[in-house]
Every structure is written in C-alpha cells, then in structure tokens.
Image (cartoon, coloured by chain):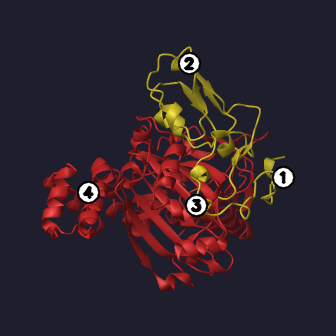
Chain colours: A yellow, B red
C-alpha cells in the first residue's frame, strides 16, 4: 500500500473558527485618538497567528556554537522573537511559534549553530488572512 | 529491480507555481501528484499583497468569476517617506475595476487553495500535510521521486517539479544554487489590520470592490527595504520588507519597524483605530536574475520562489504571476517530456527556453540591475529625504521672503543630503536603462 491509498489523509481547508483566528473586525474602536492601537505586547502579537505545535523541534540551536557569538543576528532579526540571549552568553531558543521563514539560518554567521528543517506535515504555522 | 512509478510527475508545493504546474500537467493528460506540507494549500504562504492573474487566462478561463478576490486594485501609489514629510504619486486606472482587471488583493490561504482546487478538478491528486524530506535519485544521480515524512512515504515518478518555496531544500539538494548570500533575501513582516469596509472605502477613496496598492520607500527605520499597504474587503495589510543583511546588523526588531511606519503622520490616519488580526512573516528572494539557480537537472525542474522568481523592481513588485507562469511552463514541459519519454536535463532545457521566451525571464533580464539599485544605500537613505526636502521648500510660502529658484533648492538640498552629482547621474542612468 502506498500513501496515496490513504485518502482520508487528504485534508480539506477548515473553516475559520473563532478559536483559531480571533475575529474582532467590527468591534475595533475607530478614531479613538490614542496611539495605543499601533503597538501591542509581543505575546499578544504572536497570539494572533495560529501554530499547530508538533512535539518534535524542527529547528535546533547548538548552544555551544552560540557561546562567544557577539553579533547575535538571530536575536534582532527573527520576526517571531524566538531567540533569547541568556546571562551566561548562550541563546535560549523555542521552536513552537515559528513562522518557518528561514531568516535565522540565513543571517547566522556560525557554521552549524542552527539546524533547520520544516515541521512534520500539517504542523507549524497556519496562515489565514495573509 | 525497477520500482513502479506512482505518477507521471510529482509536484512539490501547492503554492501558485506548484498548482499551475500540476494544472498544466493534468490538462495535458498526465497523472499528477501535488504534495503540500501545510494542512491546506496556502496555509504556509503570505505576501505583500497583489496578484496579477492575467497569465491564468491560459489555464483557467474567466478565472475572475471564481477566484477568491478581496478587492480589485484600481489605484497604485508610490510613496516617499522621510521625517520631513511624504510624497505620494498615485494613479487610478478606471478600467482596472472591470474584467479582465489588472491586479487584485487576495488572502493567499484563500487564493492558493482555490488554485490548487483547479488542479484537482483537472485530475491532479493533492496530498496535504506531507513534508518532502529529500529527493530520491538513482545511481546516475537522476531524480526519480521524493521521500516524505509519512510512513512508507516514498513516491516515485520520472519527473519532479520543485515548487517548494524560497527555502527550496530540493533545489539546494540538487546543487542548483551557488552558496547562499543573505544580502539577496529580504524579510517581509506584515499585520492584517481590521477596519470596517466603509471606513476603508472612505479613507482610501474607493467604493464597492475597488482597492488600493501603496508602495513605500523610506519609513523603514534606516533598514534598507520598503513598506506596503494594501486594502482587502474589511482589513488592510500593512507591512515592511527588510534586507536581511541590513536587518541583522542593527538593533531595531521587525515589529518595531512596522510600529514606526504606522506612526508616520502620512500613514497613521489611514489605519487609526484598527486592530491586529494576524501578524505574519516570510522571506522573499529579492535579487532577481542575479540569484537565480540552474532551472533543471535530470528529472527535475524548479519554479516559483524556489527558483527566485520574485520581481522586486521598486515600482513593480510581483511574484505570484511569475510563480504561476513558471509553474505553467514547467507543467507543459512535463507533458512534452512524458510524450518523448525523456526527462533528461537536456530535454528539460525546453522549460528554460519557455521562460526565456516569456515575460518571466524577459522582465527579469531587463530589470536585472534594478533590485540592487532600489535597495542601495543612496536610494534608501539619501533620496527620500532629498526629494521631500526639495518639495518642502518648493511649496512652503516664506513671505516676506521671495521664492527661491528651483535650481538653487535642488542644488542646496542635494548637498545637504550628501549626494554627489555624479552618483545621482549614475543612479539615474542605471534607472533609465533598467526601466527604459
């Protein structure tokens, strides 16, 4: 049997449900004269995107390679803010809210510091209104 | 022992390139498997925001009657931003609001899903939630299929079309790319902002399903790149594109750069009161012809972002159309290859020939020096301030002082911006030659 026989695996696009994509489009205050609308805490920002998290980390960061790195391109460039410097000179990395964009390995100057693959099929970022 | 093939052609990635490849191949009578790693086509995709679908006339007649479009772009603006002010050049094309239209805004998860469905209707088999992990190759190095992350996940075909996006691990595995250069890529980050339909209509000066496309130079916090605003039905897409090598060398994070753009006095009133519905990011291959890979190997063709086909030429920012066209030509070449029973790189050169004979590589060749010019330090950091300060002085009435001569303003402001005349002339020459 090949994987093609498993027809049930052919996923359909799910309808947007309130849980996975918060829908506030009509309740937004208009012209409130306050600049607060232009910026939100990062947790809230990343919370607007849907991530289907798999238990396997698709990106791993070799902490030993990062120690001694002074440029830390990943920390400023990662749009999901997944690279956090630690007090002992290392990097703390979390794969879960990853956009799978590739920025981190492209800007990294240290051979072997970032091992990058895609998540398992069906997992990871799921865009809706992009 | 020869293992049986699962299909005539396997297409990896159900984005615009992959779905058009699958559609063209299926229309030509081939058995096609279209593999997508997301739970549905388009779920991994985001973009700046305009699709130019005319190439679909060849594949999906009257595509506009079924395509999930947000708004038809009738107004195109190019904006220069500086601390001093903003210059906006806008053109409205009245005919762009009716068939066969020009550009359209659409959400990629909707549009890509629709396009993949066209391929499925033509007979292609769509396999979602399946990540391709590598190419399968025979002893001679010819591509003979793919390995996936599914159990028993190998699929075999005499031909594979890699439409696996900007990170294309398949093109890299096949050694079609030289070593990666991060200065060839930009990071696009975007916010989908909620605004009631009638508020969008009023603020952007459109009605019904008319939409606006605003491209912005300057306003990216000193990081080389650009900004964009596109209107959807009841949201606005706003974001920035940032040159990776520049982003990495400074200290302002991408979302802060968006925040600063949103606070510019020329931008803030357009989006005031909106909320962020979805934050997203994607990498863009930005260097055009200068970064393109070899398009073929034995048993393999590459199309779309996987072949770096985005056109980032300042006043023209396109990608989905290049992806759709390249996919279509790859799909048609697959049909010819099947008929000739020849999937060698030599035969597949027909694909490269089709790209050369069409707008895909003609536009890229013509504009080959423009992406670099647009992202250059002078165009990014000196010219927006220079132009806006000239306009500032031109239109500021400083009575009782008499008006200064225009030539004098230009000369003084050019000097103040530190722009050498010979650089200005050279950039102008590159621009004229490139665009002309």
Quadrant of the image containing the C terminus of chain B: bottom left
Task: Name the spot of residue B85 as percent of width and height, x first.
Answer: 36, 60
Same chain assignment for discs 4 and 1: no
**Relative to the observer, which residue lies in front, B61 or B173?**
B61
- Left or right: where does residue A58 sit relative to residue B314? right
Q: Secondary structure at mark 3?
A: loop
Quarter in which the N terminus of chain B is drawn: top right
Parent chain of label 4:
B
Residue B390 location, quadrant: bottom left
Q: Which residue is mark 1?
A: A5
Q: Are marks 2 and 1 in contact (CB under 8 Å)?
A: no
Q: Secondary structure at mark 2?
A: loop
Residue at (48, 27) in percent of width and height: A72
Dot 1, crowdedness within 10 Å: few (<14), some or many (≥20)?
A: few
Whole-angstrom CA distance, mark 2 to mark 4, is 43 Å
Could you say which disc has been placed on residue B272 in the image? Answer: 3
């Amino acid at each position: 049997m090949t994987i093609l026989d498993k027809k049930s695996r052919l996923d359909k696009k799910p309808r947007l449900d309130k849980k996975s994509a918060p829908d506030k489009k009509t309740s937004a205050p208009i012209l409130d004269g306050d600049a607060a609308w232009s910026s939100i805490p990062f947790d809230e920002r990343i919370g607007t995107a849907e991530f289907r998290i798999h238990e396997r980390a698709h990106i791993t960061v070799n902490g030993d390679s990062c120690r001694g790195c002074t440029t830390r391109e990943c920390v400023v460039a990662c749009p999901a803010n997944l690279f956090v410097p630690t007090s002992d000179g290392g990097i703390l990395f979390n794969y879960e809210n990853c956009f799978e964009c590739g920025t981190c390995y492209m800007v990294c100057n240290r051979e072997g510091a970032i091992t990058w693959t895609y998540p398992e099929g069906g997992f990871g970022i799921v865009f809706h209104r992009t | 022992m020869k293992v049986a093939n699962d299909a005539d052609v396997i297409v990896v990635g159900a984005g615009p390139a992959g779905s058009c490849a699958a559609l063209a191949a299926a229309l030509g009578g081939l058995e096609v498997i279209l593999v997508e790693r997301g739970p549905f086509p388009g779920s991994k995709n985001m973009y700046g925001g305009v699709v130019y679908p005319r190439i679909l006339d060849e594949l999906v007649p009257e595509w506009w009657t079924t395509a999930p479009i947000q708004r038809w772009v009738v107004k195109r603006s190019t904006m220069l931003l500086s601390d001093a002010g903003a210059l906006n050049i806008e053109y409205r094309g009245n005919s762009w609001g009716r068939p066969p239209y020009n550009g359209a805004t659409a959400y990629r998860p909707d549009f890509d899903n629709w396009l993949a469905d066209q391929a499925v209707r033509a007979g292609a088999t769509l396999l979602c939630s399946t990540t391709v992990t590598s190419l399968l190759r025979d002893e001679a190095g010819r591509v003979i299929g793919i390995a996936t992350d599914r159990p028993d996940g190998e699929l075999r075909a005499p031909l594979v079309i890699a439409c696996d996006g900007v990170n294309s691990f398949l093109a890299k595995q096949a050694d079609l790319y030289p070593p990666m250069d991060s200065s060839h890529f930009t990071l696009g980050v975007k916010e989908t902002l909620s605004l009631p339909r009638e508020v969008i209509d009023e603020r952007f000066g459109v009605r019904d399903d008319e939409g606006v496309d605003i491209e912005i130079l300057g306003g990216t916090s000193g990081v080389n790149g650009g900004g964009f605003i596109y209107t959807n039905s009841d949201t606005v897409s706003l974001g920035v594109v940032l040159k990776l090598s520049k982003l990495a060398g400074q200290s302002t994070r991408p979302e802060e750069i968006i925040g600063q753009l949103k606070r510019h006095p020329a931008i803030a009133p357009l989006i005031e009161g909106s909320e962020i519905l979805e934050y997203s990011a994607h990498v863009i291959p930005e260097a055009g012809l200068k970064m393109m890979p070899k398009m073929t190997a034995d048993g393999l063709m590459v199309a779309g972002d996987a072949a770096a086909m985005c056109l980032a030429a300042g006043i023209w920012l396109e990608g989905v159309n290049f992806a759709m066209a390249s996919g279509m030509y790859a799909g048609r070449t697959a049909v010819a290859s099947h008929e000739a029973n020849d999937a060698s790189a030599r035969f597949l050169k027909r694909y490269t020939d089709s790209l050369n004979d069409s707008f895909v590589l003609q536009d890229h060749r013509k504009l080959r020096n423009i992406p670099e010019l647009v992202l250059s330090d002078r165009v990014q950091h000196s010219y927006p301030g220079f132009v806006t300060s000239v306009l500032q002085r031109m239109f500021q009435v400083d009575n009782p002082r008499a008006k200064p001569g225009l030539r004098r303003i230009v000369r003084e402001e050019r000097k103040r911006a530190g722009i050498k005349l010979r650089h200005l002339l050279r950039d102008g020459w590159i621009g004229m030659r490139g665009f002309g």
